[in-house]
Amino acid sequence: MAAHFGRRLRKGAATTAVAAAAVAALSASQAPGVTIGGQDGRTSSGTATEPEESTGDPGATGNSPYYTDLPPLNSPNPSPSASSEPVVQGAAEAGIPATVLDAYKKAEAALRSSKPGCHLPWQLLAAIGKVESGQARGGRVDADGTTTSPIIGPQLDGNGFALIKDTDDGRYDGNSAYDNAVGPMQFIPSTWAWAGRDGNDDGLDDPNNIYDAALAAGHYLCRFGWDLSDRADLRRAILSYNNSTEYLNTVLSWLEYYRKGTHEIPDGTGTLPGNRSDTRSTSPGPSTPGTGPSAPDTRPSKPGKQGGGSTEPPASPGTPSTPPSTTPPSTTPPSTTPPSTTPPTTTPPSTTPPPTTRPTPTDTVDHLENAGTGKLTATAGEAFTERIRARAETDAGKAVAKVRIRFTVLGDTDTAFTGGESVATVLTDGSGVAVAPALRAGEKTGDVTVRATVVGRVVPGLEYRATVTERVADTVVRTDDEALACTPGGEFAHRVEVLATRDGEAAGKVAATATLITAADDAAVNDEGPYFKDADDKAVRTLSGLRTDADGRLKLPRLYADDTTGTFLLRITTAGGATLTVELTVAEADTASSEPTTGA
């Protein structure tokens, strides 16, 4: 029944109002409890809800408003030619501006390389871009992909929307009181702070640049190891962007449409969709046909009122005031009754306290405490066994639940949380504790700092120190037993290859050094005998910066001999202290290797 009704609606959708009705019928709308308004940050969608701070992950957009138009019923056809004639467009035109389309495809290519298991299609980015900003307002971008004017959503102040207090001091949205979604992919500043990417290689990550925003959206959708070719993961990813069933269904509709084909249109020639999730009609009764919206009240307000105007209607324009009374004055003599001595009754002032705003859980947080996190140490490339835990508390030490804690990996390090992200936001549980995702050590060794902060409130952060130690081996052996011999001034025919292990397993990516030493009990560098060559063909007798491969193997460069004959020693040392000493023989070709050379 619903599908049949949807087809009828789509066939008759000549106006954007009908398209909006089709959305509601097809998607069994479960729109978010917060809606989006226009650029002024206000909502026009019915009764305002009580401000309530978001208690979960705000997603990419903070569940901001979006366009609800559905794609045309008929499948699109690619443009047959590169005609300079403008494309005729309707409210649901599927053409994508050239620069915007290029940004989507470049983001797909980048994710195909960095996260091949995600299987991100550019059509998904196009679908989200259509729903979020109408493809950057119809492709109104400059040559570098930056919008000609910032795209700013409504302020998320709890007045019909989520309550997300300022997190960027107005850097991205120009608002130092509350956050707004920003740019063609509508990121809120707190999400952009960790998801932002430089998609056009200009050294900046700008949410109002379509290349940067598209790449950031791709990484956002590919986190948590999601595989977008899997239907369940695809739905999870889209809902994480904006947590609304209607949003999910609208994006999926455009995704399917774009997968069947689309065409490129010139930048700036696209049109915005006609319907938004925050502008549905919510009037209690039917409107009078032909009656437009009433003009705003522009009368000056009374002192003390803020834009509310007078509560008493003025006299109608052109209506004369009531004339003064013409009744003759009374001739009754004045009364001789003495005046009453009863004091006038005075009405006491009202003692009803003014209404107050209920504080959110975040408002009550005074500080963060370490919730039992122990020593954080891991070998490079391995996961930390200990997870970071922080507890939100009031000034009285009481735990605060339903507070968002942001964990951020600081500094120049490749250590990251699961999924490769450097930032994770976690909601505190009933005991006020937020547990960060598992932390995985990168290849850079040393100390790493992870900072925990409260999202939406300025309180001192809490820092955790994690240490990444180098990979080590406890054993190193040769992989063969070939003799290592050479004539004076010649080249050793066989190269030295070793295998490093740790606890009996191959020790991959372990640092090692190789040195020609003076004697078994003297590790000083020998200044004569066999040697390696550097890039300038000069003799070197110490090689540092070596590293075993993933299988724990290390093959040394070729060795050469000077004119000195005899037996020499090559020592290989790995991180962790494993060593191997190898004998090298330099002798004349007609001299038995087992007999000493006279005068040697």
Image: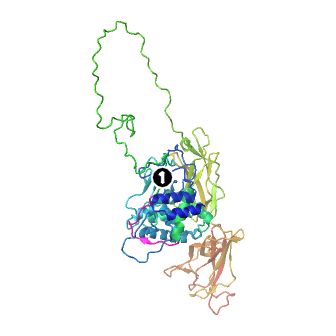
Where is residue 174 drawn, in percent x and y? 41, 52
Quadrant placement of the N terminus: bottom right
Residue situated furthest right in the rendering: 504
Task: Please tell me whether residue 246 is drawn above or below residue 460 in the rendered image.
Answer: below
Which residue is found at the position 28% from the left and 33% from the top? Answer: 320
Q: Look at the image and tell me whether residue 419 can be seen.
A: no
Q: Is residue 86 magenta-colored?
A: no
Q: Which residues are magenta?
A: 260-274
Which residue is found at the position 31% from the left and 10% from the top? Answer: 332
Dividing the picture into quarters, in which one does residue 144 lie?
bottom left
Quadrant placement of the C terminus: bottom right
Q: Is residue 263 magenta-colored?
A: yes
Residue 309 shown left or right of residue 401 in the figure: left
Where is residue 292 drawn, in percent x and y? 39, 50
Label 1 is placed on what type of residue? Asp
Residue 295 shown left or right of residue 48 in the figure: left
Secondary structure at numbered mark 1: loop
Which residue is found at the position 40% from the left and 48% from the top? Answer: 293
Which residue has dot 1 on it?
Answer: 278
